[in-house]
Amino acid sequence: MSDQDDQLMIQEDDEAQRDLEAQAIRGLANAYLLMRDEIGKVIIGQTEVVDEILISLFSRGHCLLVGVPGLAKTLLVSTIAKILHLSFRRIQFTPDLMPSDITGTDVLQDDPETGHRTFQFMQGPLFTNVLLADEINRTPPKTQAALLEAMQERHVTVGTNTYRLSEPFFVLATQNPIEQEGTYPLPEAQLDRFMFNIVVNYPSAAEELMILKQTTSSQQPHLEAALTGRQILALQEVVRKVPVAEHVFVYARDLVRATRPAEGTAPKFVKEYLSWGAGPRAGQFLILGAKARAILEGRFHVSTEDVKSVAHAVLRHRIVTTFQADSKGLTQDDIIDMLIEHVPNQLKAQAQEAVKG
């Protein structure tokens, strides 16, 4: 076979691979639209919250939902589990919850045939696909640490044994922002394991009216399954294959580094309003979230606008404000807005310099 024939075969293989990837992108975009429609049968409004949860799911990340009680956080999570044909469990975190209550424990059992006693592991509620960790900040650090291992390593350690969790494994934890008495604030290490910090706000007047009408009637919506666990795992791999241009990587890096007050290039307002900035994991999640957002919209390329769209959810729990910021009523979101305005898009900057030249 000649070199020319080899090159033709390689080109054909590349084209076939691109066709398969394009089909996978279209499949994910269609599944995303179907999921939004199915969720909309139960959840009124909260479109931004739904989008951010789905972006996190397809990026293989975990979410922290912050909102007052009664905003349908639990209903939203259970609805997502239903339409994805995934197992779902809810843990109500309390001050007396122990690690073994969530991971499982070894139980001594008798063998009726031999009469011998052996330890058998009984799985806890962590062994599921979608886990709702309700009011996660109400449980002691020891139990939070057990959940942290499961989130990061995708396994559970009990005694000397390690047990793998089934994939996909997705944790959605909730926090109540208005009641902090008797709570155990999550340490920075565990907060950093959450890809997104999603703020769940009150519905609009029109949405609240629809909620009142829908939830007080006898009609129950019928949900159709959108994806299986195996399909989700395949689509998570598709997301990671989305190409990213160099200037988008640079923009994500510069945005994260600008949050660090110790950096010499940090803007003046960061040195004044932030005492601690985001680490490298923030940049990784910015890129992964931007990839997922692009592909859910049917695009096979990532732009800086995709990075900006996920910046608040990625950064708001990774920056620590100072007393000066708090005294002026500035929130993390306010400072992220200032950062997005301040950090230049390198591609645009180069274009402007070329025009001036």
Image (cartoon, rainbow, N blue to C red):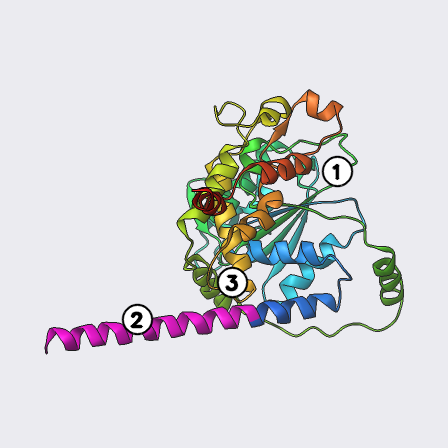
Q: Find out whether residue 230 is within the magenta segment.
A: no
* Prevalent SS, magenta region: helix
What residue do we see at 53% from left, 34% from top? 278
Residue beneath disc 1:
177
Alpha-carbon span between mark 1 and mark 3: 32 Å
The boundaries of the magenta stretch are: 1-29
Q: Is residue 72 above or below residue 18?
A: above
What residue do we see at 41% from left, 57% from top? 243
Residue beneath disc 3:
295
Q: Residue furthest left?
A: 1
Q: Mark 1: which secondary structure?
A: loop
Label drawn at residue 14: 2
Of marks 1 and 3, which one's residue comes earlier in the chain?
1
Q: Find out whether residue 22 is within the magenta segment.
A: yes
Q: Is residue 36 above or below residue 262?
A: below
CB atoms of marks 1 and 2 within 8 Å: no
Question: How many circles with numbers are drawn on the protein?
Answer: 3
| Amino acid bearing label 3 | Ile
Q: Image check: 34 left or right of 326? A: left
Alpha-carbon span between mark 2 and mark 3: 20 Å
User: Residue 34: x, y in percent?
Assistant: 63, 71
